[in-house]
Image (spheres, rainbow, N blue to C red):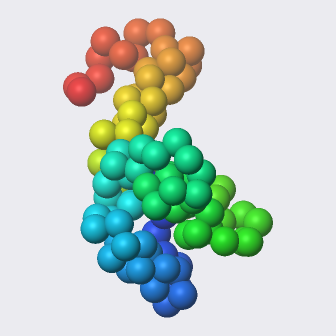
C-alpha cells in the first residue's frame, strides 16, 4: 500500500513529511526499511500505514487502484510488489493468450 500512497492534500503531505523526519527516510520510497514486527514500533509498516491513511474508509484501496502500474512497479522493487505484479501479469496474459508471453519484448 505504501508504494501507492500519494498525498492527496496538504494534511496528508504534512503527515508524510513528519513520518519522513521521524524515520529518517521516506516510508513511500523506502518501505522495505519498515521491518519491525511490533505494530506500535517506529519502523512498523502497519503503524506507518495507519498513520497515513487515518480513518478514511477507502484510502487504503486508493493506494493500489489510483497510481499507475509503472509507479507501483518502480516503488515496489525492494518490497516484492514489482515481482508480484509481474507474476500476475504473466499468469493473466497466459490465460488470455497462451502464446503472447513468447511474443512480448520484455
With 17 as the anchor, is 48 left or right in this view? right
Q: Tell me if residue 45 comes above or below residue 23 in the rendering.
A: above
Quarter containing the C terminus: top left
Q: How many labels does the image show?
A: 0
Q: Residue furthest bottom?
A: 10
Q: Where is residue 54 in the image (x, y as percent from the top left)?
A: 66, 71
Q: Tell me if residue 11 comes above or below residue 95 in the rendering.
A: below
Which residue is more in the foreground, 77 or 16? 16
Which residue is more in the foreground, 39 or 13? 39
Q: Name the residue located 41 percent from the left edge and 50 percent from the top edge.
A: 34
Q: Name the residue located 41 percent from the left edge and 80 percent from the top edge.
A: 18
Q: Which picture quadrant has residue 21?
A: bottom left
Q: Where is residue 12 in the image (x, y as percent from the top left)?
A: 52, 80
Q: Where is residue 24 in the image (x, y as percent from the top left)?
A: 28, 68
Q: Name the residue located 29 percent from the left edge and 17 percent from the top edge.
A: 103
Q: Position of residue 100 (x, y in %)?
A: 39, 17
Q: Which residue lies furthest to the left in this view?
A: 105
Q: Examine the rendering and report whether any part of residue 6 can be seen.
A: yes
Q: Which picture quadrant has residue 90?
A: top left
With 36 as the anchor, is 71 left or right in this view? left
Q: Examine the rendering and report whether any part of residue 67 can be seen.
A: no
Q: Name the residue located 54 percent from the left edge and 87 percent from the top edge.
A: 11
Amino acid at each position: 500500500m505504501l508504494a501507492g500512497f500519494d498525498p492527496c492534500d496538504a494534511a496528508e503531505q504534512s503527515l508524510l513529511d513528519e513520518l519522513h523526519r521521524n524515520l529518517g527516510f521516506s516510508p513511500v520510497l523506502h518501505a522495505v526499511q519498515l521491518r519491525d514486527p511490533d505494530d506500535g514500533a517506529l519502523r512498523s509498516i502497519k503503524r506507518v500505514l495507519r498513520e497515513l491513511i487515518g480513518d478514511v474508509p477507502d484510502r487504503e484501496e486508493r493506494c493500489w487502484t489510483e497510481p499507475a502500474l509503472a509507479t507501483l512497479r518502480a516503488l515496489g522493487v525492494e518490497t516484492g510488489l514489482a515481482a508480484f505484479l509481474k507474476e500476475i501479469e504473466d499468469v493473466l496474459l497466459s490465460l488470455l493468450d497462451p502464446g503472447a508471453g513468447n511474443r512480448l519484448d520484455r
